[in-house]
């Protein structure tokens, strides 16, 4: 590597020493970025979750993050009524489907999308958006593919951690289910 001259003699920065300092700075930057990129997502306050179902032999997958209530209230402090919500935490929730779908009466071509919701006290809307790869706070309504109504019902037992799942109904159909606090929200999903 290089050494520091503490005698005071010939303490000029030579081109060779400058190259060594520059190389060291680059190496430290690369190591720092690598460590950052390899962050263990399972250790986040809202760890990752996955919901999967196979319809007509084709995979449908939702990747999302699962926040906890931690004493907060749904509709006010979390997923506020009347505001578009990221439907999870951290990165935007993604839907990847290998088959064309009909979700709540809307046709969704095979592909990858982000899922957002518009919660309200009387019902929720599922928003399927064409923009992908963004953080969950970067919603662009101009990229909406469709908005569909979801059915809301009360849960018998409260759910502390936000959960997305599929309730398979047959070879070509399922319900997409969102559970949190004392609320269940569902919409029909059918493979075309």
Image: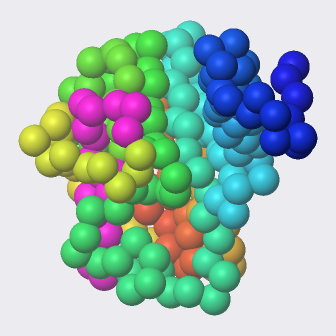
**Is 70 drawn above or below residue 164 in the view shown?**
below
Closest to the observer, 116 or 166: 116
The answer to whether residue 127 is magenta is yes
Estimate the x, y position of residue 169 in percent, counting from the top left.
Answer: 54, 36
**Is 52 drawn above or below residue 104 in the view shown?**
above
For this view, does 47 lie left or right of residue 178?
right
Estimate the x, y position of residue 188 in percent, counting from the top left.
Answer: 38, 43
Furthest-left residue in this view: 142
Closest to the observer, 114 or 123: 114
Q: Examine the image and state in which quarter residue 19 appears.
A: top right
Residue at 27% of width from left, 18% of height from top?
109
For this view, does 129 lie left or right of residue 58?
left
| Numbered label tally | 0
Quadrant placement of the N terminus: top right
Q: Examine the image and state in which quarter residue 4 appears.
A: top right
Closest to the observer, 135 or 129: 135
**Is 129 drawn above or below residue 12 in the view shown?**
below
Residue at 35% of width from left, 31% of height from top?
132
Quadrant placement of the C terminus: top left
* The magenta segment: 116-134
Estimate the x, y position of residue 172 in percent, counting from the top left.
Answer: 47, 22
Whether residue 190 is visible to the viewer of this picture, yes or no, is: no
Residue at 34% of width from left, 16% of height from top?
110
Residue at 66% of width from left, 82% of height from top?
70
Furthest-front residue in this view: 9
The answer to whether residue 7 is magenta is no
Q: Examine the image and state in which quarter residue 103 appears.
A: top left
Whether residue 142 is visible to the viewer of this picture, yes or no, is: yes
């Amino acid at each position: 590597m290089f050494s520091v001259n503490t005698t005071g003699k010939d303490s000029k920065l030579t081109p060779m020493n400058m190259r060594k300092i520059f190389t060291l700075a680059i190496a430290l930057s690369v190591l720092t970025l690598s460590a950052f990129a390899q962050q263990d997502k399972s250790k986040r306050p809202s760890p990752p979750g996955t919901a999967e179902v196979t319809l007509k032999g084709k995979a449908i997958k939702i990747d999302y993050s699962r926040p906890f209530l931690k004493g907060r209230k749904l509709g006010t402090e979390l997923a506020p009524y009347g505001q578009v919500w990221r439907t999870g935490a951290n990165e935007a929730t993604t839907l990847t489907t290998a088959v064309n779908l009909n979700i709540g009466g809307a046709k969704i071509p095979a592909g990858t999308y982000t899922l957002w919701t518009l919660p309200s006290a009387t019902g929720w809307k599922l928003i399927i958006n064409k923009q992908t790869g963004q953080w969950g706070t970067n919603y662009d309504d101009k990229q909406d593919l469709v908005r569909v109504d979801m059915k809301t019902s009360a849960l018998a037992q409260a759910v502390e951690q936000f959960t997305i799942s599929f309730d398979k109904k047959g070879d070509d159909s399922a319900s997409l289910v969102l559970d949190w606090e004392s609320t269940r929200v569902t919409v029909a999903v059918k493979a075309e």
